[in-house]
Image (cartoon, rainbow, N blue to C red):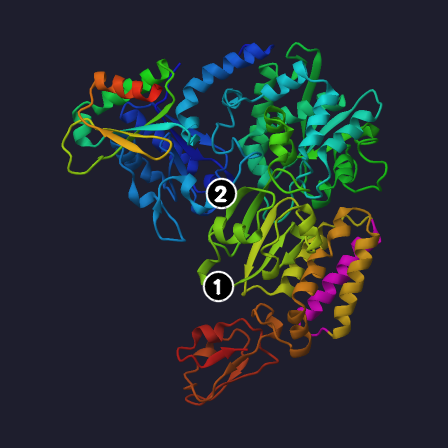
Amino acid sequence: MAQIKTLADLQAVKERVYATMKTRVEAFDKSLSQIRIAMATSGISAGAKEIFDYMIEKTDERQIKAVITQTGVIAEGNNQPVVVEVVMPDGQSKIYENVDKKSADAIMDSLKA
Amino acid sequence: MTKYKMHILVCGGPGCSASKSEQIAANLRSHLQQEGLEKEVNVVLTGCFGFCEAGPIIKIMPDNVFYVKVQPEDAKEIVNEHIIKGRMVERLLYTEPSNGQKTPLDTDTDFYKKQVRIALRNCGLIDPENIEEYIALDGYKALATCLTDYTPEKVIEIVSASGLSGRGGAGFPTGRKWAATAKSKAEQKYIVCNADEGDPGAFMDRSILEGDPHSVLEAMAIAGYAVGADKGLIYIRAEYPLAIHRLQIALDQAREKGLLGKDIFSTGFNFDIELRYGAGAFVCGEATALIHSMEGLRGEPTMKPPRTSDKGYLGMPTNVNNVETYANVPAIILKGADWFSSIGTENSKGTKVFALAGQIKNVGLIEVPMGITLREIIYEIGGGMKGGKKFKAIQTGGPSGGCLTEKHLDIPIDYKSLSDAGSMMGSGGMVIMDESSCMVSIAKFYLDFTVEESCGKCTPCRIGNKRLYELLDKITQGKGTMEDLDNLRNLSHVIKDTSLCGLGQSSPNPVLSTLDNFWDEYVEHVKEHKCRAGVCKALMKYEINPEVCVGCTACARNCPVNAIKGEKKQAHQINQEACIKCGTCMEKCKFGAISVK
């Protein structure tokens, strides 16, 4: 283990490890938007898992402040395969259906503004 | 580096690990591996979550969903349902006692809603055996900031301005203590952490050391820089093996990273810490007794002055603070004195950790801002009284504190208001009692503890407490007189005024506060030979109602001392002289003919 000799060394360790803990810590932060992806059986078979992974990767890359979680069926009786719900810090929510990578990008962009 | 999509936090606190939480973590890991998810989902064994009532607890992040009373065999369902399909496992969710609803998010529960976590900020969030997780949450940044940007005077100024005061119970201003040690001139100075937590039922310091040991190490190094000491000692009870184990790991990792040892942050500042084990004597929580114990002498207090800041360990200036006090320091340095002093009341700043115990629904570890009322703690965080019984008293401050009643429920908690009410903050034990507790017996219980723990050095404490105990015992036996009640009070004041150290000076508090607040109950014991709570056995009388008794002989046959006589099919009688009040007869009677008075 390398010794920490400066504030910059400390910061480097912090950033490296924080990246692995981000999903744990930021959940406490209620000022962040939540992106919830429906991962019921139908969702998974329609590719919800890929969208989930994709969004986790991309929000990080683009530094979009949001917590991404999975959930069960969103909006019961709705048959659209991949469903994503965005809950804003003020409690307002929007539901997107039929989400693919392209529309996932658009959802993330909408949070950036 | 792996980027985890989810984290499963498993409580590794004292209560939950006793209920196999380590096995839960192991099962979760193996099921995740079977599903090929071990790279995406991280299982972390953390420090105490505090909500011991509902343990073992696990928490799933970032969903913030928490499951209660989890068993090792629930691991598979949690992985299959929650982790893979995103469906909550309903049956493991927590049910809020106030409205009977399932509450998946811990932040929404009455138990957590009113809490403010500073000293416990990382407990239940990080892996205490991994220094990097502590660093990731700004760990050791406060030390770096002090060493590179602040002079020692500036550090003391910040701590003083924050209003932080001793969390061991007495509430001495921390900044003033540091300043006094800094002022003393000597070749060698010491920083001591008092981890000799001894109040019955208290586990605040233990939870901090087990859940976030680095916060204490970092703060001790900061204190070392501020007062000019390069050696630290942690005096910890040998009965805390897990805390010792985690501290040892933390010390090793901090040395390996160069955060303890020589030339820390290339500033020429040296600091290292050693562990010293206490053998569990209550009096060793007193600073001078603690220091003598570390020196290899008897754990006995000495007169102050000289204060430890002038002459402490090995005769050198020594700064002694409690675990929780230290745990606050890094946060104060990083967020500023103004931030800290904005929390709390005018004369008590910040938060306090309490261990809730007794007859309330939610027992556990809580951290609340100073100024919160006892009512909020008992009825909101604590969920109210168990079994619908009526609140009777709350004991704060352990054996040095007192019992408060209904009329004290709305005072804002701080050092001053609690001592004005006849109790004290203490290290943070809170025992809530309902009508089934006898207050004379409670006072006797604490005196029994004090008599056992008195070191015997000074007469008032050694003999006075023994006599107090005997008087209380006499009253619970139904042999007390009204004069005894006066003697209790007088003797209590003598012990308080003349004892050498804090132990004796505060040991009569449970007696005085119960005399003040439950005078009627004492009088009842003396005059009417009655214990309304039904706790004092000598005052109880079992009686057989001859109208109801059918003479089945069940009571007589089961009485262990043959105190019941009577012919078959005739009403029986109890010989009160011989009766030992064990209650077996009442238990065995199928006709409800036996009652207790």
Q: Amino acid at mark 1?
A: Lys
Which range is magenta?
B458-480
A27 or B221, nearer to the observer: A27
Residue farthest toward the front in the current orientation of the protein: A113
Q: Which residue is mark 1?
A: B389
Give the left or right position of residue B72, taking residue A94 as reference: right
The residue sitting at 45% across, 62% down in the picture is B388
Q: Mark 2 or mark 1: which is in front?
A: 1
Q: Residues within 10 Å of mark 1 (few under 14, many from 20)?
A: some
Can you see residue A3?
no
**B66 in relation to B500, above or below:** above
User: In the rendering, at what x and y percent does residue B150 appear?
Assistant: 69, 18
Q: Which residue is mark 2?
A: B15
* Residue B305 picture quarter: top right
Q: Which chain does tag 2 point to?
A: B
User: In the rendering, at what x and y percent does residue B492 appear?
Assistant: 77, 60
Q: Amino acid at mark 2?
A: Gly
Q: Which chain does tag 1 point to?
A: B
**B358 in relation to B345, above or below:** below
B448 or B78, nearer to the observer: B78
Mark 2, secondary structure of its residue: helix
A16 or B52, nearer to the observer: A16
In the image, is residue B553 part of the stretch drawn in magenta? no
